[in-house]
Image: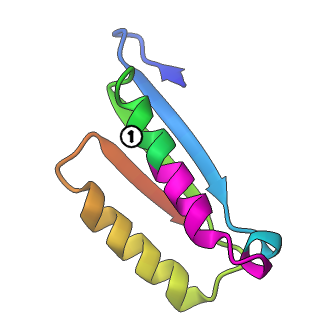
Amino acid sequence: MVRLPGGESIGIEVEWFSRATREKKRSASVLAHGLGQAVLALTHRNLAILVIGCSASRGEEARELRRNLIRACRGSRMRAVVIQ
């Protein structure tokens, strides 16, 4: 959580898709958990940022995830950052 000088706060949720989660086919549950935590953060924060690391994903998968998350967050108080 980051508190801004004006009193507003930003919640930050970080999830990482590692090779272990990919091998166990847990990527969907990791993503669902991260989204849920970011939405819950909005109950107490002015903005929520979901940071997702995709080092175990193929480039096209990460780009597709980024496009879909940005579209889903449009117009809301939640932002998504996908890094590879």
The answer to whether residue 84 of the structure is visible from this angle is no
Q: Which residues are magenta?
A: 22-35
Between residue 48 and residue 4, name the one nearer to us.
Answer: 48
Q: Image point 42% across, 34% down: which residue?
A: 40
Judged from this view, the residue extending furthest toward the left is 75
Q: Image point 77% across, 76% down: which residue?
A: 24
The answer to whether residue 7 of the structure is visible from this angle is yes
Q: Is residue 24 magenta?
A: yes
User: Please, is residue 70 above or below residue 78 in the view?
Assistant: below
Image quadrant where one finds the N terminus: top right
User: Circle 1 sits on which residue?
Assistant: 39
Left or right of 3, for residue 77: left
Q: Measured from the top left, where is residue 56 in percent x and y?
A: 72, 78
Task: Name which quarter of the figure residue 64 lies in.
Answer: bottom left
Task: Name which quarter of the figure residue 22 lies in.
Answer: bottom right
Q: Measured from the top left, where is residue 8 in percent x and y?
A: 35, 16
Q: Secondary structure at mark 1?
A: helix
User: Please, is residue 19 above or below residue 36 in the view?
Assistant: below
The crowd level at tag 1 (other Cα within 10 Å; few <14, some 14-19, many 20+) is: many
User: Please, is residue 29 above or below residue 24 in the view?
Assistant: above
Image quadrant where one finds the C terminus: bottom right
Q: Measured from the top left, where is residue 53 in percent x and y?
A: 64, 63
Between residue 27 and residue 17, name the one nearer to us.
Answer: 27
